[in-house]
Image (spheres, rainbow, N blue to C red):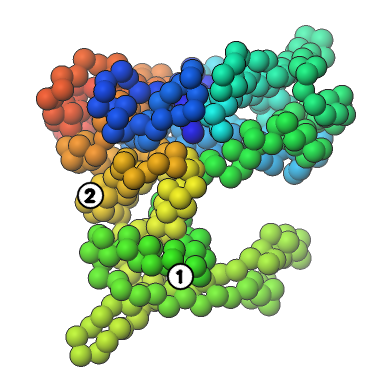
């Protein structure tokens, strides 16, 4: 379960900003909107967190930062060669030629153990990397640290001698542009597997709900029980869909156009080989005709988004994943959007599943699907720097209309509209 994510010098984020899943002390939030953990140091974490803000405020940057961290942890050791550039973008609206490293840090709980892991990197190399661990009933332990000295060009290392495994081989095998954590796992450093596996399997990031394909949900429909539950999600928001027809196809090399280069063709074949694709048709019961099926491409954008989200949503709830979605409410009716959020905040969510999302739809505040501790505002200052400010930073009365206060400018995170300029 995610506790906190922090990032600095990444895209529109200049100074360190943090998204916290730590609740306040009220009995209501802890009983209704939190998971109970097995950690004495952090007994409660929020089930969900929402990010509100104007267009261009930097909400998507926070999601992109999480996506970058996940990808770099999973892929940095196994993909790329020494000397390859790291695809990280610093804050570019400050000093010229900003080559300072971007920094990422995450705190999470897995199997009752709290992990604090982070790194900093620019396009050339990893500058720092660290991992601290707090067992369920113990004190914080420093597992490793790595620090690059720009003046000497040397890398200073600390690796806890109590860790089992080939520590020296892991260290020597870590490229300048790769993470030690990733490299050690590739070399059978099983002591780090819980951390690596949390990034690879438990942290799910959807950059945009509208760019999500139907494939994952369609593949889930091969399981009859999951198929029925996916149908239930669509029925719950009154789409009228009562059945699916799904055809499965494997990637066909002959479908690649002849006009592309041989190099691009080879790369496509390598990346797509073995992948399966699905054609989905949605069925509605038409009086006098029975079930009539339409290609899902003929459905509304909202229905397609809902179908595409249904698979990952149920997967998250079943397995206790942390799901991060940018622009969650796009194309969705407010009530459908509220429904998805309520599935995560529901008392039935006992697996540890969490949701972090960005949205412009403030009706979810009025519908009381969120507690005040779950609401965050994102805005840019006069220097175009993104900041995150939780609602808990403000004095909010229990009966206060949060949506009204937000749209009235009380909490920031609003666009400035200059009607006289049009």
Q: Residue at x 65, y 21 (%)?
A: 131
Which residue carries the number 1 mark? 224
Q: Residue at x 26, y 60 (%)?
A: 236
3 or 27: nearer the viewer: 27
Q: Quadrant of the C terminus?
A: top left
Helix or strand or loop: what does disc 2 sit on? helix
Which residue carries the number 2 mark? 334
Q: Is residue 408 visible?
A: no
Residue 285 is labelled as none
Measure how far apart labels 2 and 1 are at the Cα level.
29 Å
Q: Residue at x 44, y 42 (%)?
A: 351
102 sits to left or right of 42 = right
287 sits to left or right of 165 = left
Q: Is residue 278 visible?
A: yes
In the displayed orientation, state which residue is furthest to the top.
Answer: 151
Residue 8 on image: x %, y % = 52, 21
Residue 357 on image: x %, y % = 38, 39
Number of marks: 2
User: Residue 174 occupies which quadrant of the picture?
Assistant: top right
Residue 343 on image: x %, y % = 32, 47
238 is higher (above) or lower (below) than 326: below
Residue 282 on image: x %, y % = 36, 74
Helix or strand or loop: what does disc 1 sit on? helix
């Amino acid at each position: 379960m995610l506790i906190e994510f922090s990032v600095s010098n990444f895209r529109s984020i200049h100074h360190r900003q943090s998204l916290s899943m730590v609740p306040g002390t009220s009995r209501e939030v802890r009983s209704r909107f939190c998971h109970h953990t097995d950690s004495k140091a952090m007994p409660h974490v929020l089930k969900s967190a929402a990010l509100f803000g104007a267009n261009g405020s930097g909400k998507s940057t926070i999601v992109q930062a999480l996506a970058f961290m996940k990808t770099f942890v999973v892929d940095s050791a196994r993909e790329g060669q020494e000397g390859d550039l790291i695809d990280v973008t610093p804050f570019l609206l400050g000093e010229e030629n900003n080559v300072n490293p971007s920094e990422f840090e995450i705190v999470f709980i897995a199997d009752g153990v709290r992990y604090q892991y982070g790194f900093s990197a620019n396009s050339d190399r990893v500058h720092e990397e660290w991992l601290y661990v707090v067992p369920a009933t113990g004190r914080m332990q420093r597992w490793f640290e790595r620090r690059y000295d720009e003046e000497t060009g040397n890398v200073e290392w600390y690796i806890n001698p109590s860790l089992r495994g080939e520590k020296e081989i892991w260290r020597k095998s870590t490229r300048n542009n790769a993470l030690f954590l990733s490299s050690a796992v590739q070399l059978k450093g099983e002591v780090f597997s819980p951390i690596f596996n949390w990034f690879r399997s438990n942290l799910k990031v959807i950059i945009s709900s509208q760019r999500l394909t139907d494939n994952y949900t369609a593949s889930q429909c091969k399981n009859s029980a999951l198929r029925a539950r996916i149908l239930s999600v669509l029925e719950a928001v009154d789409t009228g869909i009562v059945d699916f027809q799904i055809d499965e196809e494997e990637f066909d090399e002959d479908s690649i156009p002849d006009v592309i280069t041989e190099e691009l063709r080879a790369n496509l074949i390598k990346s797509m080989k073995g992948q399966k694709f699905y054609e989905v048709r949605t069925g509605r019961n038409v009086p006098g005709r029975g079930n009539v099926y339409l290609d899902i491409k003929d459905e509304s954008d909202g229905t397609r988004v809902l179908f595409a989200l249904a698979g990952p949503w149920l997967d998250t709830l079943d397995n206790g994943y942390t799901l991060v979605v940018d622009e969650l409410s796009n194309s969705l009716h407010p009530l459908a959007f509220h429904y998805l959020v309520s599935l995560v905040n529901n008392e039935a969510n006992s697996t540890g599943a969490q949701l972090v999302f960005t949205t412009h739809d403030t009706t979810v505040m009025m519908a009381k699907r969120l507690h005040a501790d779950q609401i965050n505002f994102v805005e840019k200052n006069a220097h175009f720097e993104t900041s995150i400010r939780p609602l808990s930073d403000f004095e909010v009365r229990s009966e206060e209309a949060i949506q009204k206060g937000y749209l009235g400018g009380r909490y920031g995170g609003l666009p400035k509209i200059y009607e006289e300029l049009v």
